[in-house]
Each structure stands twice: as C-alpha cells, then as structure tokens.
Amino acid sequence: MAAGVALETLMARYQAGDIAAATDLIDCVSPQLHRFFRAQLATRADADDLLQETWLRIHRVRQTYRAGEPVLGWFYAIARHVGLDHYRRIRRTATRERRWAELSAFAEDSHPQHDDGDLDALLQALPTSQREVIEMLKVAGMSLEEVARATSSSVGAVKQKVHRAYRRLREQMNAPDRGKKPSGALS
Amino acid sequence: MKDEDIDRAAAEATPIPYELDEALRGRLRASIPAPLPPVRPVPATWVLRSALILVCAVVGVAGAARAGFYGIERLGLWGALPILAALGLLAWLASDKLIAELIPGRTHRLGAGALLASVSAVLLAVFGFSFTDYHTERFLSAGLTCLLTGLLHAIPAAVLLCLLLRRGFAANPISAGLVAGALSGLAGVTMLELHCANFEALHVLVWHTAVVPLSALAGAAVGWALRRRSPGPAH
C-alpha cells in the first residue's frame, strides 16, 4: 500500500528529528484518529482533547516505533490506549459522584447521536471492543493484522469480534423498532 | 440484511476526506517542539529478548552462587536439564510477551493471563515429572523460606528488567506489570532450582511454583497503581 509506505517513511524522518515530517504525519493521520474517537462515542470536544493527548503521547514514545512495522497499528494502539484511559476516568468519576439513577442519565448525555451517517447510530449498539474493531477495519481501512496489532490481540480474536459485531448489527438493522436509542453502551 | 449491506453502510457513512478544524490542526502542529530532537528507535526484538533472558539467568545464578549450588549438585546435570530447559523456554515466552506489552502495535500471540497460566502449568508438569518423593517434612516453614527467597530474587530481576525496558511504553500497565512480574518470578525459581536441595515433590510443586504467580500479582498491582496515577488529557 503506497500510503502505508509513505507513512512509514514519514515516521522514520520524524524519529530522525524532521519537523516537516511530523507536521505531515499530523495532517495525514489526525483525521482518521479523530474519526476513531468520534466513533467511540466521544463528543466533538472530547475527541479534540483525546487527539491532542494522543499526539503528545505519540511524541513522547516515538522511539518505540521500529522501521518496517505497520505504522497505522502503532498509531491506533496509542490512540486506543488514550481513549481507554479517558473512558476509565469518566466511569471512575461517575461511580464516585453519581448515584445509579443519575448515572444512566449521564450515560445518555455523554453518547451524542452523530450526524456522520446511519452506521454511527448502529455502531452505538455495539460494545466498545467490537465497535473499535469495526471502525478500524471498515472505516479506517486497516488490515486484520494491523487491527490485531492496534488492539493488542491476535488476528483470530479480531475475526471473532468482527463476526460477533456483524451478527449484532444484522439483528439491529433487521429489528422492527430500529432507530431506538440503545442503552448501556458504556458497559 | 447481509454483510455486504453493512459494508456498504460503512463506506457511505465515512465522510472522505474527514476534515479537522484548522484551529485544532494548528494546536496539534504547535504541540511538536522545535527544534525536534532525534530519537534512537528501541533495539530489535531479538536483542531485547536476549537481554531480558540474560538478566533473569544472571540474577538466578548470582543468587545461587551466593547461597550455594546445593540443588543442582544433588540433582546432577542430567536431572536438572529438563528443569533448566523448561525455565529457559518459559523465560523466552515471557520475554517475548513483555516486549509486546511495552512496544505499541506488536502482535500478541497470548494474553497476559494465559501466559501466567501456561507458565504455572508447565512448571507444575516439569516439577511433577522430576520430583516423585511425596513424603513431607517441615512443609510450611521450609516452604515459606523458599517462597520468600524466590520472591526476594524476583525483586532485583524486576528492577533490572524495568531499567532495560525504560524506553518502552506500557499501553496496559496492569498487563505489562503482570508479565514483568512473571518473568522476574522465573529468575527467582531459577535461583531456587539451583540452590534448594529439598526434593520433596509437594515442597517444590507448591512453594517453588508459587513464586511466579505471586510475583506476577505483585507486578500487576504495581501496574494498577501506576495506571491510577497516570495524568489524563488536559481540559
């Protein structure tokens, strides 16, 4: 894949201290990562913050990328970690500060309906682990191997998640009351 | 509704190109400091793996050299060979997993929990095969001494492993801590196998094997504490 090779070259130049390569990487990869955070049910403001945090993290650990390895898997592994940290923190805060009744209302508020298309509404019904796999595979166009690297799992485990996600999506799309807002998507 | 319909929905739902705010783009560019210092990529996996295994071997042998090689002297080289071979193989597996935990975007053949279960199961099998004396004496007191000795040797091994991998990045600190603990525990078990001359099967099966899961749990607890301390995105 030509784009993949170009990204790997940019990454190597970024490691070598080329600031132009770093800027090009930001321009190339940020839209995908922002879309990824939005698909994880983040608000636009949250996605902006998460993207900024991701780039800070990428900058701090850029030495861990090794030439010749899939660069998208490396970017998404870091982005995924930043996202997980964020949702863990939200859940912890919510647990501490809100009662159960208030928590469900909070979950509704923090899961905005997207205007990016029907798929986003459908994806909201999926658990986070399945949603992120579908997002990487079908929307970001990553390979199974890259998704496995990004999610710290095996190709077999990714295939299984995709299979389960598709089954759930099929049920959701065939459901007569389609369009109803799903609940408990944080779990 | 077919899978192709879902694929089509995915393709249609993705606005291409997905544009970012220019202000956000500017903030991201500004977050890269100028001048940008070059960084040296982390060494190749085989170099890291060799270094990790060497650290475990050195800690185990050094501990036994200080306390005495009574175990291997009584067991003999041929008797010790399957145990040492198993320890080497398990250290290879655990070091591979630890590298995967500390370098983002690496493939994971095995989960951290599965690795710990596999290491414990292999140790139990090898010890069960090598030691057949089921008579026990001073089971608790002798056992606790060995357990403590093994754990005390896991600590310097863990410190050295952390130093070796300090340029890595633990995406999941709990999982990374668990694997680092298991690998350090193997250094402790190596020391015990070289030193301990108590060949009672139950003693070895229970107390020597227990070093690995306990050390792994301690590592996971350290990882959990580190994760709770990690700062979040600045709002």
Image (cartoon, rainbow, N blue to C red):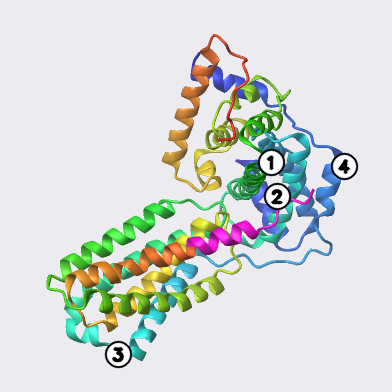
Mark 2: secondary structure: helix
Q: Secondary structure at mark 3?
A: loop
Sequence order check: which comes first, mark 1 or mark 2?
1
Disc 2 packing (10 Å; few <14; some 14–19; many ≥20) = many
Name the amino acid, label 3. Answer: Gly
The span shown in magenta is B220-235
Label 4's element? helix
- The chain identifier of the residue carrying mark 4 reads B
Q: Are marks 2 and 4 on the same chain?
A: no
Q: Chain of mark 3?
A: B
Judged from the image, the secondary structure of the residue bearing numbered disc 1 is helix
Badges 3 and 4: C-beta atoms under 8 Å apart? no
In the depicted view, which residue is nearer to us: A187 or B156? A187
Quickly name the residue at label 2.
Answer: A54
Q: Is the same chain shared between marks 2 and 3?
A: no
The disc at residue B23 is 4
* Residue B206 in sight in this render: yes
Q: CA distance from mark 4 to mark 1?
A: 16 Å
User: In this figure, which residue is indicated by the disc labeled 1?
Assistant: A33
How far separated are the C-alphas under marks 2 and 4?
Answer: 17 Å
Whether callout 1 and callout 3 share a subunit is answered no
Residue type at the position of mark 2: Thr
Chain label for disc 2: A
